[in-house]
Image (spheres, rainbow, N blue to C red):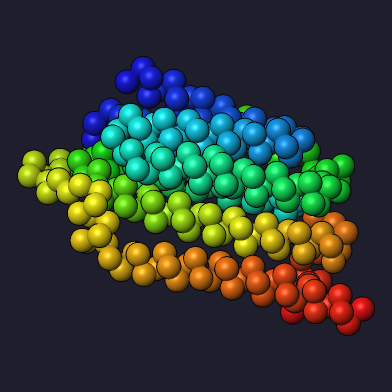
Amino acid sequence: MTLLIGCLALLVLSVVLLGVLRDLLYAAASLAAASVLLSIVLFQFGANIAAAFELSVCAGLITVLFVSTVSLTMDSDQKTEAKLPAVFLLPMLALFAGLAYFLVHWLAGALPTPATQVQALTFQEAFWGQRTTDILGQISLVLVGVFGLLAILRAKSTGRNHE
Amino acid sequence: MSEPALALFFTGLLLFMTGVYLLLGVRNLLRIVLSVEVLAKGITLMLLAAGVYRGAMGLTQSLIVTFIIVETILAAVMLALVVICQRTNASLDIRLLSRLKG
């Protein structure tokens, strides 16, 4: 429990840093740290495959994509970004913590005790047996992503040809 | 609910609210992508909390994996839009996003 609380506290801290830091590269590093901490939390609860996905995809791939985009765009609008959200982040975080505490306290009393006989499926049984439709959805999403990227980049190159 | 599930749900809710606050408060497109990622972390934690509460980690893992794929596709498309917006407007201000033409 102590390790869990420590990881969750560090996770919140990395998100606060992400909101406060002006340099986007440091903010991307904070996001990667948050992903690593989340994967540790997932490992603690035995969600090994989800943790490996989180670690490789979110902490790895998304961070690489983000850093590449920061280098491509040269972060031109840093100086014009409003400072107000970062200044008020900590007071708002305290407010959100109070609100979340209230909601969790209410939820703890409102939710019924779960049934003792929960059908304990393995990941493979749940993923390939019960959630087959999700796989189709994921394939569709990957195709949407690929074709979306192609459409965006092709539209830009067509625009350049017109110029 | 057990204590770990409550702690996970509390943190997930906190991250979700912080993500919404950051999303509403910034104008830089790259920071908006970061805020969406914070939202996604909160949602992942809440999914995990639901799995711990029900004791069905297999199903929870499959849902989390699906959500991670959704998150990645979303980030990739958003970052491509950011690059195009920067090249078109020489700015990352979200208010200039409407200038993009198909």
Q: In which quarter of the image is the C terminus of chain B?
A: bottom right
| Picture residue at 56% right of the left edge, 27% below the top | A13
Location of residue A150 (image quadrant): bottom right
Q: Which residue lies furthest to the bottom in this view?
A: A162
Residue B68 seen in the figure: yes
Q: Give the total number of marks visible in the rendering.
A: 0
| Picture residue at 70% right of the left edge, 63% below the top | B81
Work out whether B59 lies above or below A162.
above
Give x and y (percent) for residue A6: 44, 20
Q: Is residue A48 left or right of residue A124?
A: right
Q: Is residue A60 left or right of residue B24?
A: left
Work out whether A57 lies above or below B91.
above
Q: Which residue lies furthest to the top in this view?
A: A2
Work out whether A131 lies above or below A148.
above
Q: Quadrant of the N terminus of chain B?
A: top left
Work out whether A22 lies above or below B71.
above
Residue A111 seen in the figure: no
Q: Which of A24 and B43 is in front in this view?
A: A24
| Picture residue at 67% right of the left edge, 47% below the top | A66
Q: Residue furthest right?
A: A163
Give x and y (percent) for residue A134: 34, 64
Q: In this view, does A82 lie to the left or right of B19?
A: right
Q: Nearer the viewer, residue A64 or B61?
A: A64
Give x and y (percent) for residue B86: 82, 59
Give x and y (percent) for residue B88: 85, 66
| Picture residue at 39% right of the left edge, 68% below the top | A137
